[in-house]
Amino acid sequence: MKIVFATNNKNKVEELKTLLPDHIEILSLKDIGCTEEIEETEDTIKGNAKLKADYITKNYGYDCFADDTGLEVDALDGAPGVYSARYAGEDATYEDNVQKMLAEMLNKIDRKAKFRTVIALNLKGNQYLFEGVCEGMILKQKQGKKGFGYDPIFQPDGFDRSFAEMSLEEKGKISHRGLAVKKLVSFLK
Ligand code: IMP
């Protein structure tokens, strides 16, 4: 089975490849000739996941799935949430966002946070949604070099290491995206 994963994020594609069974082959946006950036204009994670999947189905005619993820921090009233990619500004890098988060959280005692992923799947004219949540805390400094985004400053509950100190397989077993993908895979089976 071939299905399009509507993302340009190489890290996400690599993660997904370790999570999907062999009989499901992922096509990237590049593989289908889509080179344009799909703008995330909705104000919810669910809305953006739907928007990205719908853009591909409408313009390219493929069954596909898209994910959107946000980091929700309790002490910041759930921010940055859907704005996680642009937390430090429109063209913010991962490092800019991490530094802004460390600064905002400098004197905060409550460090609870969660990653939330929503996957929207368009299949044979219907749309299905799958959600995964990973609870944890924001560290006081960066730890580890693996992963991407906020991984170096997020420690999942039950672990004494950040996501950036875990292999893709280990992160995938407990992560927001891993949990959402698990639901997607059991649905596709
Ligand atoms: P996106 O809109 O789903 O691509 O993700 C929004 C932001 O969340 C991106 O800037 C990433 O830095 C961050 N992000 C998404 N997934 C992860 C993850 O698994 N670990 C760390 N950061 C992530």
Image (cartoon, helix red, strand yellow):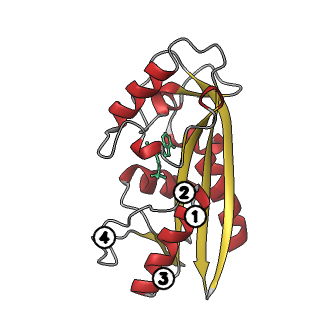
CB contact under 8 Å: marks 3 and 4:
no
Query: Which residue is label 1 attached to?
Result: 47
* Mark 2 or mark 3, whichever is nearer to me: 2
The amino acid type, in three-letter code, at marker 3 is Thr
Where does the image place residue 135, in percent across and percent down from the top left?
A: 68, 35
Label 2 vs 3, first from the N-terminus: 2
* Mark 4 or mark 1, whichever is nearer to me: 1
Residue drawn at x 40%, y 85% as measured from the top left: 60
Categorize mark 2 by other alpha carbons within 10 Å: few (<14), some (14-19), many (20+). Answer: few
CB contact under 8 Å: marks 1 and 2:
yes
The amino acid type, in three-letter code, at marker 1 is Gly
* Mark 1 or mark 2, whichever is nearer to me: 2
| Residue 143 shows in this picture | no
Where does the image place residue 118, in percent across and percent down from the top left?
A: 61, 58
Query: Which residue is label 2 attached to?
Result: 43
The amino acid type, in three-letter code, at marker 4 is Lys
Where does the image place residue 29, in percent across and percent down from the top left?
A: 36, 70
Categorize mark 1 by other alpha carbons within 10 Å: few (<14), some (14-19), many (20+). Answer: some
CB contact under 8 Å: marks 2 and 4:
no
Where does the image place residue 81, in percent across and percent down from the top left?
A: 56, 44
Query: Which residue is label 4 attached to?
Result: 30
Q: CA distance from mark 2 to mark 3?
A: 21 Å
Q: Is residue 163 above or below residue 35?
A: above
